[in-house]
Image (spheres, helix red, strand yellow):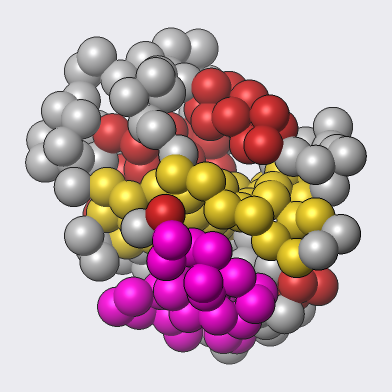
Amino acid sequence: MYFAALLARTEDGWEASDMELDGVEFLTDLIDLARSAAVDDDTVVALIEQEDAWFGVVRVDGEEDPRYFVSNASAASRSSYGSMLTKELLGSDEEDNELDELDLDGTEDGEESRISAFSDEDDDQDAVGGTGAEPVPSGPLGDPRLLDDLGVTHKALLDLDGDALSEIADSLGATEVLEAVR
């Protein structure tokens, strides 16, 4: 089971909305949802989690390219919505990111991708990405610094587990609005 929400930054703080994933078949659908929630092209953070197995963060700032982070690439790659994120982060050449091959409850195993794992010892690494040399790691994938300027440091993001979305919302000052849509 998934939980997904959008947090849109406004002049008065954060506004939260429940993100309905039923209409999301492609990653571009998710990005379009985030952009439509933006107030004056300000930052929108899409948060997705699957029953504490993994969480994902997508940050959209106006028309800039979205930034992505997944807490556990291996677990995410075996779920429908997580596989969209991991494929994007891996730079998959597949044109077809449709979800029809995956069970939308996230239980069916997908095809294993190959990437390099993020090293906690390499604090200067801006993004975690793939070289094609190793199987999907059971650790993080993406840009762990995507929330640094919003109060969630990359070290804190990498250390999150359990109820990670609540901890992110707490750091952003958006706990109440996120809990209202949960």
**At which x and y percent is residue 136?**
35, 52
For the point 36% across and 43% down, the residue is 82
Residue 53 visible, this angle: yes
- Left or right, 65 with reference to 107: right
For the point 35% across and 58% down, the residue is 182
Q: Overall secondary structure of the magenta stretch? A: helix
- Left or right, 85 with reference to 66: left
Label count reads: 0
In the image, which residues are magenta?
154-180
Query: Where 159 falls versus 147 (above or below)?
Result: below
Query: Where 95 falls versus 80 (above or below)?
Result: above
For the point 54% across and 64% down, the residue is 177
Residue 132 visible, this angle: no
Residue 156 is inside the magenta segment:
yes
**At which x and y percent is residue 117?**
46, 64
**At which x and y percent is residue 81?**
35, 37
**At which x and y percent is residue 32?**
63, 25
Residue 9 is inside the magenta segment:
no
- Seen from the viewer's position, the closer of residues 74 and 181 is 181
Among the 4 quarters of the image, the one containing residue 69: bottom right
For the point 58% across and 23% down, the residue is 28
- Seen from the viewer's position, the closer of residues 120 and 102 is 102
- Left or right, 137 with reference to 56: left
Among the 4 quarters of the image, the one containing residue 149: bottom right
Query: Where 51 falls versus 150 (above or below)?
Result: above
- Seen from the viewer's position, the closer of residues 134 and 94 is 94
Among the 4 quarters of the image, the one containing residue 86: top left
